Amino acid sequence: MKGRITVLCDNGVGPLAGTLGEHGFAALVETAAGSLLFDTGQGATLLHNAQRMQRDLRKVGIVALSHGHYDHTGGLWPLLQWCGAKRVCAHPGIFAGRYAIRDGEKGRSIGMPYSREFLEGQGAGFDLDSSFREIAPDIFLSGEVPRRQPFEEGDSGLFCDAAGCIPDPVADDQSLVLKTARGLVLVLGCCHAGLINTLELAREQTGETRIYAVVGGNHLGFSSQMQLNETVKKLRGYDIQKICGSHCAGFAPSARLMKEFPGRFHPAQVGYTLEV
Ligand SMILES: [Fe+2]
Ligand SMILES: [Fe+2]
């Protein structure tokens, strides 16, 4: 497939004046066959930024959600209000309760801010599946990602309960996989499943070993130094042309990737576009 990826929501904004940042992520994938929205941010900036960038979200045929955290799903309600009914592809686990506990704070709810029933009443047609699947020509959702790399321990501040007794592996986390002439292009939400786990699944399932680009939140900003070190080692073996970090990529890990992969790392903030 050929198309264009545009970051609509991110923690930071790029040089495009008049756009807004928020803690969250959303990216628009436009192809000749139609538009797909991957994630929706937390709801404060999606419609504004899309309008500023002259992207008509009413043309979006499919909404895909990377996982059930509020900063990727909160924009769904404003989107439905503005654009009407949408097919929403996600993992069946997106509505589970989930919490963050950081720096000694009390458990903070970070799950989906709206119930399934409410969103269905607003026009969401949920298409829930945990397997790797093609949702448009040469556009795939990874489904649940097997955790095979022992060093990809993930974020130790996430829990299934407010008391912090049950660690949350965020099993619903998935990424978008585009099969292009230059190789695979992955769009990540938070990549809680681990970047290398996700890349390996995409290669295995598509039969395409070349990775052209990775765009989105790689969560290295919330992972251990050990995980970052091991991820860098593994990434050296892929010959990825573009590593575009958003949202939870973190300043220091992004600076490290920029140094390790000269000319190949790009901060992908609001307004960043990539032709694929
Ligand atoms: Fe996130
Ligand atoms: Fe997340």
Image: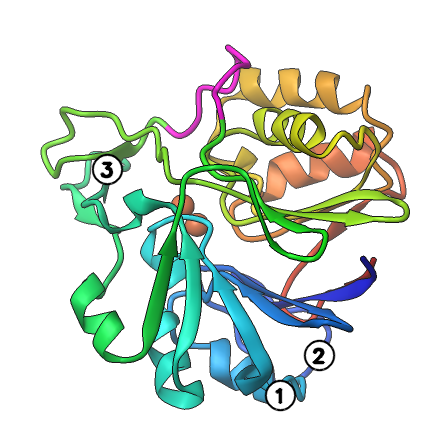
Residue appearing at x 77%, y 50% in the figure: 266
Q: Which of the two labelled residues, at mark 2 and mark 3, occupies the earlier sequence position?
A: 2
Residue 101 got which mark?
A: 3
Residue appearing at x 53%, y 13% in the figure: 151
Q: CA distance from mark 1 to mark 2?
A: 9 Å
Question: Is 52 within the magenta?
Answer: no
Up-down relation of residue 224 to residue 242 (above or below): above
- Looking at numbered disc 3 in the image, what kind of residue is underneath it? Ile
- Looking at numbered disc 1 in the image, what kind of residue is underneath it? Arg
Residue 52 got which mark?
A: 1
Q: Dots 1 and 2: beta carbons under 8 Å?
A: yes
Most extreme residue toward the left is 163
Up-down relation of residue 263 to residue 83 (above or below): above
| Tag 2 residue | 16
Q: CA distance from mark 1 to mark 3?
A: 35 Å
Q: Nearer the viewer, residue 210 or 261?
A: 210
Secondary element type, mark 3 = loop
Up-down relation of residue 66 to residue 222 (above or below): below
In the drawing, does residue 86 fall left or right of residue 182?
Answer: left
